[in-house]
Image (cartoon, grey):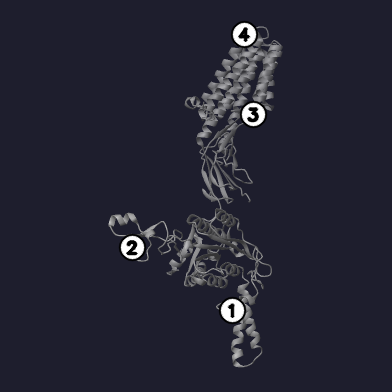
Amino acid sequence: MSGTETEIESGTESEPAGDGRRDRVAIAELVALGWLVAVLGVVAGPIGVGAGLATAATRYALETPSAIGVGTVVLAAAGVGASDASATTVAGIALAFLGLLLAPTVRSDRPLLEGAVALASTAALVGTAWVLARSRPLWVAAGALLCGIALAGYTLHRYELVRLGLVPEGPSPETADQPSETGAES
Amino acid sequence: MHPTRRLWAAIALAVVLALFAVVAARPLALVGTGLIGAWILTEQYRFLRALETTVDALRVHQAPLRSGIRTDDDVPVTLRATLERPSPLALEVDGGLPTATVSNAPLSLSLAPGKTSADRTIDVSWPVAGHHRFDQPAVTAANVLFRETVPVGNAPTVTAEPRGPRTVHVGEGGDRLATAYGEHESGRRGPGLEPAELREFTSGDTVDDIDWKATARLATPYVREYEAETERRTLLVVDHRSSLATGERGETKLEYLRDVALTIAASARRLGDPIGFRGVGDEGVTTRIDPATTPATYDRIRRELLALEPTEPAEGDGSGSRSGPSPDPDGETAPPNRHRRRIGVRATAADARKKLEAIGTDADAFASTLRPFYAARDGYRQRIESEPLYGAVRRATRRETGGRWTIICTDDSRPGELREAITYARRNGNTVMVLLAPTVLYEPGGLADLERAYDRYLEFEELRRDLARMNRVTALEVGPQDRLSSVLSAGRQRGEFA
């Protein structure tokens, strides 16, 4: 037997809107990178400006996580906050990079909500890391931070399963109490 | 929510930064880890919201062209996905074809970000009969970091019926036969189990016939008579020559006749009637089972009926006629002509030939008048006697004298041979039932021209009525009810009826 295939696709209504959104994101990211360089300059001086420019260059070529990694490594390698990072320094650095997390929210239909999530998660994770780093060994702080990230991610994953009805149903208490059909009678 | 490689790369980077912070004693690197973690959580939340919105706006529908099909039919199945508004996610929709299906293309389609609808149609066949339920279509939504699969859409059911005769019509001129088989009454009184009537004792009755209960009740000798138990000797002759292969696969003439023949055999078994069987192919008798009432005989007849297949046409002659007599499985052949010269026996081809030779080349009016008659009769005799069906009926019924019920299952492609076979079978008080499959109802595309089909059906009906006019002969039509109804509707539109 033969199989015939026909495929019809339609729907180009979103093309102009998509272009507009991409432009907004690009502008937002430029603004965020500018913000990054400026705030790092205020917090860490010329080293901060250099780290900001390195971050911007990395962001131009790669994804946001790579840019964040390059920026923080440059700052850490340069000794910013090496001995005892103050809350102001840490907050300032986190605030500088926060722009990169907020830039993609401009294409969302609920940017304030997504922005709040970004802000809250940054504050929670960075704040936890700073508090633990000041009172505990670094490996404890690092481990707790990674566990916190994993736990938060898993919580969102479970929420998604419940929200979409993807949670597999287990055996009900009634069927679990019934004897097996293959059991022999004594 | 499943991570992609790019997400794993980001997670690995966060872990590397944490290790760097520990190893190099640079706590500031933990800020990078925290920022990457916040970015991951933000992207995860963004994907979750997009997925919820997409699933709410997505409509997926899969449907076969029809839900009632025959096995091995190719049926188009369409998968359609529509979005109320474009989604930022890339969607892959996989249809839920049942397990026992065969198709050479996957039932799936994709919706790129920004697209709002897509269709896909493929041909699917169901080789297994039964009810088949589709699985719910699976929609896989993905962006660069996450991927999730969600069931969305309907799950229709398809019923695949095995190929074979559908509504089998057995009747006369389009009228269905009310009851074809059942208890056969002999109409005679005699030994039996079914009481018929109670009458007074008369001279000639024996003491054993007296019903003592009735006698005591009525104070006069009474005799109770019973319905005489009889058995109807039945011979089932099924023609399975090449012409019986006409029709769609699983719905040929032979399939329909087999269906009826199996019913007849089952009825004989239920009534305890002795039944024999002859299978007739293009080369002659293919199966011979003498009448008996043993369970082994009934079973063997049923097996032989189920195993019947149309034979190939005889070489050199599509009608299957040969110049000599046809052999049967036991090696029995027609005896020489001189042994059939008995009073009352119809003249054979040899007789016609001798008479033709006796006339010779005489030129008088008597010879010239008779010569064409004997010449034509000689050829006709030879042809008919070599026909497999006639030969099989003749050899199977030549010694039967009354009480034999011969059932011939064949088609209308050889009316001359059929008439001769029926005429021979009904000799000596035997009865004949002919089950005829009209070719017009079986030919693929035969109903494309209903007017022409109706005319052909009228020709068949004329043949059937002609056969039914014979004494002790019942001629019935066997065919698919739906096709017959279509043909008869053409006649009603014309204002005629069969």
Q: Which residue is mark 2?
A: B201
Q: Residue at x 43, y 66 (%)?
A: B492
Q: Which residue is mark 3?
A: B4
Q: Which residue is mark 1?
A: B347
Element at badge 3? loop
Image location of residue B6, percent across then percent down: 66, 27
Mark 1 or mark 2: whose residue is earlier in sequence: 2
Foreground mark, 4 or 2, reads: 2
Foreground mark, 1 or 2, reads: 2
Image location of residue B131, percent across then percent down: 53, 44
Q: Residue at x 58, y 77 (%)?
A: B342
Q: Is residue B371 above or below residue B325?
A: below
Foreground mark, 4 or 1, reads: 1
Mark 1 or mark 3: whose residue is earlier in sequence: 3
Foreground mark, 1 or 3, reads: 1
B175 or A156: nearer the viewer: B175
Distance between the alpha carbons at the discs numbered 1 and 3: 94 Å
- Asked if labels 1 and 4 touch by Cβ distance under 8 angstroms, the answer is no
Q: Which residue is mark 4?
A: A86
Distance between the alpha carbons at the discs numbered 4 and 2: 133 Å
Farthest-out residue, front: B207
Question: Which chain is indicated by disc 1?
Answer: B
B188 or B436: nearer the viewer: B188
Residue B18 appears in view: yes
- Amino acid tagged 1: Ala
- Amino acid tagged 3: Thr
- Amino acid tagged 2: Phe
- Amino acid tagged 4: Ser
